[in-house]
Amino acid sequence: MPESGPAAPSRLHALAARVYGPFEALAREVTKFGIVGAMSFVIDVGLFNLLLYGGPLEGKPLTAKVVSVAVATTFAYFGNRFWTFRHRGRTNMGREYLLFFMLNGVAMLIAVGCLWVSHYLLGLDSALADNISANVIGLALGTLFRFWSYRKWVFPAVADDSAELDLAERDATTPI
């Protein structure tokens, strides 16, 4: 006969906590990562258009894009460092920032690679096909790569060894 009364819900809660527990921190990170990414996207597109169509870089779309991407990526770094991954290990900020930019470059190559395969290899060269390959598939694969690579290399897990913790804390407080 199944249990009823106050003990049954507490067992159910305990089971749910055991199942969901390992994924709770990951779910929070994914949510925060998505929010930071969305805000970075708005900064990138907004600043690009502001600079190009009403600002000092009128008629210079490539320069406007480089500036908007650099500003958006810098925002994304600080948003992820001090919000998304604030509980993870810290290393030298200069190292993190450089690695963050490099991994963003790899993610951009993933999106460009998806576009190249679709456009040139498969011959799908309509505006819709280009946008789906670059801005849906490429962006999704690049975002998955960014999240995984940031967790692995830029913002590593906190070490258990006290000497490693001391070293990480010293590196984190060392100026760029």
Image: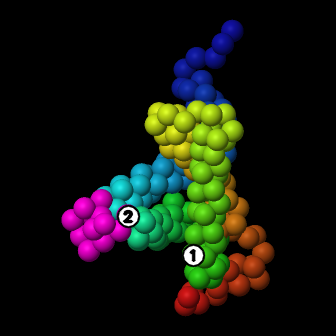
In the rendered image, the residue lying farthest to the top is: 1
Three-letter amino acid code at the position of disc 1:
Tyr
Q: Nearer the viewer, residue 118 or 145?
A: 118
- Quadrant in the picture for the C terminus: bottom right
Residue on which the image places disc 2: 61
Q: Secondary structure at mark 1?
A: helix
The total number of labels drawn is 2
As displayed, is residue 109 above or below residue 9?
below
Residue 157: horizontal and vertical position, in percent?
69, 64
Residue on which the image places disc 1: 97
Give the label, 2 or 1, closer to the camera.
2
Three-letter amino acid code at the position of disc 2:
Pro
Residue at (75% x, 79% y) in the render: 164
Which color scheme is applied? rainbow
Give the magenta part as a residue range.
49-61
Residue 51 appears left or right of 8: left
Circle 1 packing at 10 Å, graded few (<14), some (14-19), many (20+), is: some
The label on residue 113 is: none
Circle 2 packing at 10 Å, graded few (<14), some (14-19), many (20+), is: some
Magenta-colored stretch includes residue 138: no
